[in-house]
Image (cartoon, grey):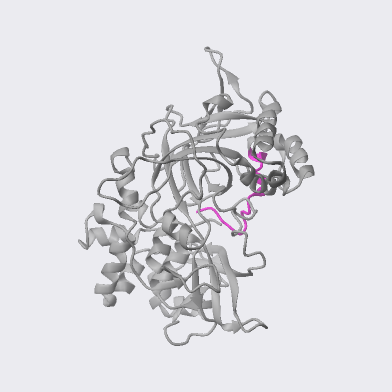
Amino acid sequence: MRRPENIVHHTKNTKSASAASASSRISHMIGRRLRSNHPHRTARASLALIIAAFLAACGQLPTHQPAAPIVPATPPAAPGLHKPAERPEAQVDGSLLWDRARAQWVATDWPELPGWTQDRVSEAWSALWRSCQRATGDWLPVCTKARALGANWGRDAGDETVRRWLEANLRPWRVQGYEGQTTGLLTGYFEPQVDGMRKAYGPYQTPLFRPPLDLATRKPYYTRAELDTLPEGRAALAGRELLYVADPLDALMIQVQGSTRIRVLDDLTPEGQPRQVRLAFAGHNNQPYQSVARWLVDQGAFSLDQASWTSIRGWAAMNPQRVPEMLRANPRVVFFREEPLVQPEQGPLGAQGVPLTPGRSIAVDRDAVPYGTPVWLDSTEPQAWAATPPPARPLQRLVVAQDTGGAIVGAVRADYFWGWGDEALTQAGRTKQPLRLWALWPRDAAGAPTDPARILSMGADEKARPAK
């Protein structure tokens, strides 16, 4: 899916003292209402909720055992890359340590995983099965068995059977930084849903574009301001319009997320209903991302602690004449391709090239955790703001690393795919949680030489999702 960046969280301090409060501050959202993913529902989700919700995490959870206290740590801005080891190495104390390019994995066992016996692991089977369609290297033997069982085997077999299968075939490895850091940050994202039109009409005047024809030949490409104002910039976008949305901040939100579902009001199905399509990430202008929230803080619009999508939209409502100036503070522009929404129950394609599963897919730093790796996630649920917040509820579940993002850098760092719809939007806007991770790797591979560049990473759709 390759979401470009995270607008609000790039302005925040991610140290432990602020993690919970920052998540709570994003809970009060305002703005124009947009349709949910259910075409026949009258309920709508607020645009500001949608915009905030790319910060998301978690879903419906079972009752878990209490999580051990976790202190979130600030992930390094750009951790250095190390030479990955071909195999784990035994340490003086008898433990096994496996060096990855941006993380170290420490061999452990299943009892170390908080809440492991409580999760509905069968719900993650289909996500793992999809990743296994692109398996190579260490994963071939395990994934051959998984593919033979089928996509629906987890649902039919039940949690305990799936859990025993995972324990028999995989081994958990605690993920940590090269300085031994085992705690990090969980944010989240979602797939927006908006109304749009193929032709500019009424309030629908803000276009979303295909890649310009000369995008590959000019690097860096024009900035956002140059595309808006220069004759040659505007000419490059002429005729590249895909769809029009009603609010420039809708367009910004969609570019931040890198994908969206659009209900096309002037393109009806044979049944007379607006056609639903997906716009997927197709590239960007190779310009650096700049947070509009940070720009507003620098302008004195609000303080760093007050930065949220509520405050951004509030400022825009009070200063409509300055909205173009705010948007141009971010020189990056994202381009899209249109895809039919053939299977609306599935999420967009992640960077591994398989559809994302709500609540069971995460974006990771692929130099720390390869695509396709099952991961045990230990965090806390995001909660609505309260003057006296209730005790934290654990978020402990099996997920699969199937995506990446521009802000997802470091060993213990993940972005949780919430899905789409009202609940996803709400939870996404609240998520900035402490995190611990365990990678689950084939048991029989621990002592065998491995080419780290080929471990499931061949599933990455690099052409469609170029590196930032």
Of residues 31 and 386, the one drawn nearer to the viewer in this rendering:
386
Q: Is residue 416 above or below residue 267?
A: above
Could you tell me which residue is drawn at 57 percent across and 47 percent down? Answer: 360
Q: Is residue 460 magenta?
A: yes
Asked if residue 428 lies left or right of residue 117, the reply is left
Of residues 234 and 87, the one drawn nearer to the viewer in this rendering:
87
Of residues 157 and 93, the one drawn nearer to the viewer in this rendering:
157
Q: Is residue 333 visible?
A: no
Q: Give percent across and percent down for residue 342.
A: 67, 67
Q: Give percent across and percent down for residue 68.
A: 42, 30
Q: Furthest residue to the right? A: 148
Q: Which residues are magenta?
A: 453-468
Magenta: main secondary structure: loop
Could you tell me which residue is drawn at 68 percent across and 47 percent down? Answer: 155
Q: Give percent across and percent down for residue 424.
A: 48, 58
Could you tell me which residue is drawn at 44 percent across and 33 percent down? Answer: 66
Q: How many marks?
A: 0
Could you tell me which residue is drawn at 73 percent across and 36 percent down? Answer: 142
Q: Is residue 415 magenta?
A: no
Asked if residue 166 lies left or right of residue 418, the reply is right
Q: Is residue 257 visible?
A: yes
Point out the image quarter for the N terminus: bottom right
